[in-house]
Image (cartoon, rainbow, N blue to C red):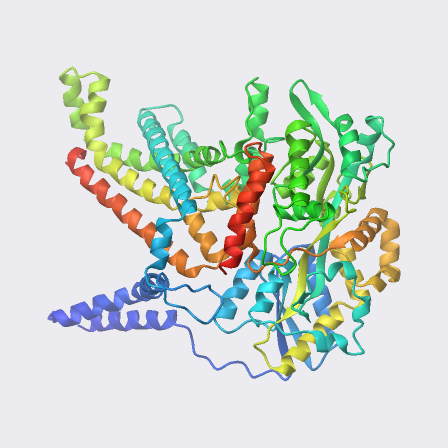
Amino acid sequence: MSHLRRTFVAVLLAVALLLPSWAPPASAQRAMTITVWFPLPTGGPLKEAMDDLVGRFNAGRTDMRVSLEMTGDYWQNYQKLQTAIVAGSPPDGAMIELMQIPEFADAAILVPLDEFAKQRDFNMADMAQALLGNSYWKGNLYAIPWQRSTTLLYYNVDAFRDAGLPEFSPPPTWEEFRRIAPRLVVRQGDQIMRFALEGSFNHDWLYEGLVYSYGGRIVSQDGRTAMFNQTPAVNALTLLRDLTKRDRVLNVNPNFPGIVENFIAGRTAMIAHSSFALALITNRARFRWSVAPIPAGPAGPVLNAGGGNFVLFAKTSPERQRAAWEFIKWMTSPANTAFYTMRSGYIPVRTSAMEDPQLRSYFRQFPMARKSTELSLEHGRGRMVVLNVERNVRQFLVPALEAVLLGTADPKQALDEAAAKANAALGAR
Amino acid sequence: MRFSRARESLVAYAFLFPSLVPLVVFTLYPLVSSGYLSLTGWNLLSPAKPFVGLYNYTRMASDPALLSVLGNTALYTAAVVSIGVAVGLGLALLLNRPLVLRPLWRGVFFLPTVVPLVVLSGLWLWIYDPGFGLMNYLLRTAGLPTSQWLHSPGSALWAIIVMMVWHTTGYNMVILLAGLQNVPEELYEAARIDGAGSYTVLTRITLPLLSPTLLFIVIVASIQAFRVFDPVWVMSLGTGGPANSTATLVFFLYRQAFMFFEAGYASAIAYLVVGIALLFTAVQLWMSKRWVTYE
């Protein structure tokens, strides 16, 4: 009997231990703590750079402190934010990918930043224009660029020399590319040992840049109508198809990190990739290389933008929003954005950061980093604006691009079909 | 010792309580809740959950994307289960014989099962790389034609099937080995005395007595294969591509819910998944009555 009772008590105790404890919260801190979600893994050089910055910010403030919470990557960050928003408890601020801005802005869960940005202690005019393309939604400013990159062409200077081409002569246009590309290709029987160019052209990031450069768009300015079946977009895809299937000089590779490895291993003379890849190539490529704009179509060169931006969530009090803005303002100061560029390889978000003495000496050490930054700032372009781009555009566009580039569909026909589906989805939202 | 029935069941419940709580919170509640969601057009973001009746279910019936996804899933499941169980059975029969270094071989074939699927998928992504992957390197070295593997809609799903057969065979083998060891030695002895050949022993003794284990493996492997997600997600780089050729039912569900934010439609698909899994099990149990021998 007593044995049984003892067992019973033990079980109850075990249960009690499993339940969350209701200990009173630690005594409220005097300083306000602002939580910012950041789409990085919980380790690595970028995280260390961010910790460095946030540590310095916190050391300089007595009235508030920032707690940076790592959410993994843009996609996980996005999903965690969705969940938190549904649950009614988003963080004070977050860094989100630029194509996610319209959705959050449209759902009225972001704080418009216009009033903050107008204040005298924030120099909005100094923000890099090339990076602001997606910061606005329906006339309001919602996002401040931070962790930003663009598409970029990397080329193997030695490969150009070996092909009998002038060494530093990246093709400025696709016409020129088509002329010289066969000379850069190395064949062994039927096997292609080195392609002229490799890139994830099956995805809309590179393809959209190409369409811009052909004078077209993926969707209309208001994001309500698919435009990727119009002439410029069809021409851009036809070019890609011809380079892949007819000339066999372009290797469309969906494996984004694999492309960098192929470049380093000399399996392709050029790659179309992110400006961020510069950090991955530096010190690893055993040949001379350089950077250039992606070859241009009739409308001139375009480097398509991508990357993260600071936003604030509207759920919190004005007081907390002001505090969170203090953090954004501090982070995006010329010296701090220059610091992050040196540590991460991302583009500085302020024009004046280019004059930062430390960044200048860094650029002297890595001239390719300066060149790539200048190219991004000169040719950078904002992305298409669509609510839920995954559902409304990508699910139709990407398979169409893939089918054409695999040679199983005609560009015009495939894009027409995909556009009809996209328009149905865009209309139905 | 005198204790009442009521007290006895109270103790039982006390012991069950710790596992009942997660069961209710993480299984029963979501099951009921997604049943309700499947009747709404909720977009996962807005506070409003408009009631749409059976719209999501009728939409499934007329969704061409869902049809192709079901086709992919059926092919994948059939291939992974049949090849995986056949190879696992072959290995089990082989490794049930006295063999030099037998424990080592058993361990070697079981090894791929132990590695987490996401890690494996990432690894095979490189193995399948058409340019510098191990697979094409070996084929080239052997003078055989190479393949685009994951980059072509014709071969991508098969590339995943090959990897998953490799991954699941070890598990099938171990379970079947355990089954083989339950076959009484006397039966083999009796058969030998009666002069039965090894083929007769296999078809008249081993397989019939192994049939409950085989049934178990087929059910478990089918349900596992039917729910495939991780390798598709990793190896198609989150797209289900090229050209949707690797999109399976659970991937489709995930995409509707967490990429397209159609929580209502995704919940309806989740019920389809449950329905098919139940049907599966029912059919297999019914079929088993015809050919499974219980001792």
Quadrant of the snapshot with the N terminus of chain B:
bottom left
- The structure residue drawn at horizontal position 67% and vertical position 17%, both measured from the top left corner, is A189
* Residue B183 makes an appearance in the image: no
Nearest the eye: A335 or A322: A322
Q: Position of residue B34 (x, y in %)?
A: 36, 62
Quadrant of the snapshot with the C terminus of chain B:
top left
Q: Position of residue B17 (x, y in %)?
A: 28, 67
Q: Position of residue A174 (x, y in %)?
A: 76, 37
From the viewer's perspective, tell me whether residue A222 is left or right of residue A418. Answer: right
Nearest the eye: B14 or B263: B263
From the viewer's perspective, tell me whether residue B195 is left or right of residue B164. Answer: left
Number of numbered markers:
0
* Residue A237 makes an appearance in the image: yes
From the viewer's perspective, tell me whether residue B173 is left or right of residue A416. Answer: left
Q: Quadrant of residue A196?
A: top right
Nearest the eye: A370 or A251: A251
- The structure residue drawn at horizontal position 78% and vertical position 30%, both measured from the top left corner, is A179
- The structure residue drawn at horizontal position 59% and vertical position 25%, both measured from the top left corner, is B137
Nearest the eye: B191 or B171: B171
Q: Quadrant of residue A69?
A: bottom right
Q: Quadrant of residue A402?
A: top right
